[in-house]
Image (cartoon, grey):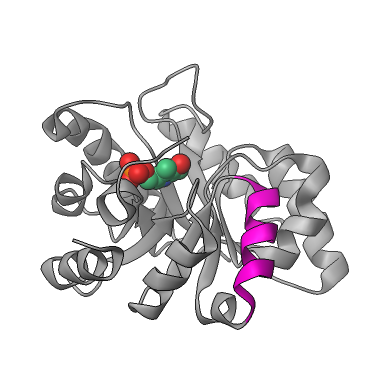
Amino acid sequence: MGITEQYQKIRNEIPEYVTIVLAAKTRTPEEVKEVINAGATDVGENYLQEAEKMVAMLGESAKKVRWHMIGDLQKNKMKRALKVFDLVQTLSSFNQAEALNYRASADGKIMPVFVEINTGQEVSKKGVDPDFEKVEDLVISMTRLEHMSVEGLMTMGPMTSDPEDSRPYFRKAKKFFDNIKELDLPGVNLKTLSMGMSESYQVAIEEGSNMIRLGRVVFGDRKY
Ligand SMILES: *Cc1c(COP(=O)(O)O)cnc(C)c1O
């Protein structure tokens, strides 16, 4: 199956309330353009520079979708990031949030952001430790930043061969999501839980995800 068929098949199989973010790393502009023409609404990039290149090469097509930062965002690149991204899914510290907020205020923008949780507590991954107080403290401190709105949580979870192994991590993220929501913090409008990838998206949706991030299952295996 090609990209169009694969995207539409998954789109039709999952509930309507679930947003699909296409993970564009290693893909060509032609491949990304195809999925946009197939109806994709959201595209994710792991590196600022690759997002800039992709958006420039796609021209008008790029304007049809929202661009998500799903990789680590360096503090000194916030100004450029605000130009290309509609949403940052990977905030994990107050310093980083403050740097983004500072730039957003200069642009007169309010940037939607997600807080990333390192549910597997892996040293190789970014994100806040899966400790409720830490997540809560960060989100509360971010309510002071007037040029961003915390709209979701994101998690990767450890790489596993069996998607069932991801379930406890997704469940944990959902619990954080519900708990933060319950705090009803001013300026926090938590609505999105971004979790689930090619192998694990079905389990993630069962556990409460309403945004999945797909690469291989739509585009095919990555060739580096
Ligand atoms: C690559 C990537 C994905 C998608 O991964 P696949 O296994 O190709 O579906 C999702 N989220 C992030 C943060 C990624 O870097």
**Seen in the image, is 51 located left or right of residue 82?**
left
Residue sitting farthest toward the top: 123
**Image location of residue 85, percent across then percent down:** 63, 63
Q: Does the magenta stretch include residue 178?
A: no
Work out whether residue 118 can be spotted.
yes
- Look at the image and give the residue range highlighted in magenta: 47-59
Give residue 53's position: percent from left, percent from top: 68, 59
* 191 up-or-down from 37: above or below: above
Q: Residue at x 58, y 48 (%)?
A: 140
Does 120 appear above or below 12? above
Place residue 19 in its image quadrant.
bottom left
- All told, the count of numbered labels is 0
Q: Which residue lies furthest to the right in this view?
A: 106
Query: Is residue 176 visible from the viewing direction of this image?
Result: no
Query: Whole-percent x and y of residue 215?
Result: 36, 50
Taking the magenta stretch, the answer to whether it contains residue 58 is yes
Q: Find ligand 1 in the image and state its quadrant.
A: top left
Q: Left or right of 95: which side holds 93? A: left
Image quadrant where one finds the N terminus: bottom left
Q: Position of residue 104 (x, y in %)?
A: 78, 64
Which residue is found at the position 42% from the left and 38% from the top? 223
- Residue at image location 61% in from the left, 61% down from the top: 54
Res 93 quadrant in image: top right
